[in-house]
Image (cartoon, grey):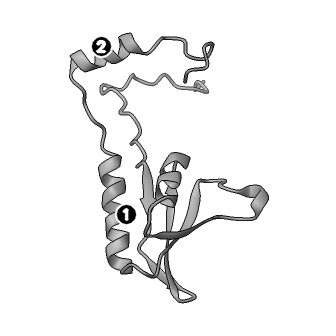
């Protein structure tokens, strides 16, 4: 009789972690109704950052109003006063630069740990 679930050997290698998603995804700009736009998929904080850039004319959320940001994807319209290729490249460079993790020295890490209380939910500071 063959067992239903045969005994499997443990893998010799440790399983690797799944790849971390990029903090944002940006498409190439395309012309739509006379203005240049691109799609941006990112966390709400990144979308808010892009929304307030001077070269951005409008940020439109994907889907109907009651389904806003189901997957954090927005269509960004570039201001026609700016050269679309330069504006898009500048936005892309800004997002790349802002998404790089920064390693702090141990002294700064410990000072931040001492300065920020462990439980910030009760005092309303954070």
| Label 2 residue SS | helix
- Residue position marked by numbered label 1 in the rendering: 91
Residue in the picture at 52% in, 54% down: 47
Q: Position of residue 116 (x, y in %)?
A: 43, 15
Separation of marks 2 and 1 at Cα, in angstroms: 34 Å
Q: Quadrant of residue 122?
A: top right
In the depicted structure, whether residue 36 falls above or below residue 44: below
Name of the residue lying farthest toward the bottom: 34
- Say which label, 2 or 1, has the lower sequence index: 1
Residue 30 lies left or right of residue 60; in this view the side is left
Horizontally, residue 31 falls left or right of residue 13, namely right
Quadrant into which the N terminus falls: top right
Q: Can you tell which mark lies on residue 113? A: none
Residue 78 in the figure: left or right of residue 74? left
| Quarter of the C terminus within the rendering | top right
Q: Give neighbour class at mark 2: few <14, some 14-19, many 20+ (Cα, 10 Å).
A: few
Residue 34: x %, y % from top left:
53, 89
Q: How many marks?
A: 2
Q: Nearer the viewer, residue 62 or 116?
A: 116
Q: At numbered mark 1, what does the secondary structure look like: helix, strand or loop?
A: helix
Name which residue lies at 36% across and 81% down: 83
Q: Quadrant of residue 104?
A: top left
Task: Tell me which corner region of the image, top left, top right, bottom left or bottom right, holds residue 124.
Answer: top right
Q: Residue at x 36, y 26 (%)?
A: 11
Q: Nearer the viewer, residue 18 or 3?
A: 18
Closer to the camera in the image, 99 or 35? 35
- Which residue is located at x 29 percent, y 19 percent? 109
Q: Which residue is mark 2?
A: 110
- Spot occupied by residue 119 in the image (x, y as percentages of width and height): 54, 12
């Amino acid at each position: 009789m063959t067992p239903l679930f045969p005994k499997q050997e443990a893998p010799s290698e440790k399983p690797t972690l799944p790849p971390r998603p990029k903090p944002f995804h940006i498409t190439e700009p395309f012309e739509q109704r006379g203005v240049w736009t691109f799609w941006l998929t990112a966390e709400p904080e990144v979308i808010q950052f892009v929304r307030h850039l001077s070269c951005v004319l409008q940020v439109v959320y994907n889907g109907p109003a009651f389904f806003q940001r189901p997957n954090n994807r927005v269509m960004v319209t570039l201001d026609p006063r700016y050269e679309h290729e330069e504006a898009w490249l500048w936005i892309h460079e800004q997002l790349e630069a802002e998404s790089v993790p920064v390693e702090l020295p141990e002294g700064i890490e410990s000072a931040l740990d001492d300065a920020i209380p462990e439980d910030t939910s009760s005092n309303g500071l954070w």
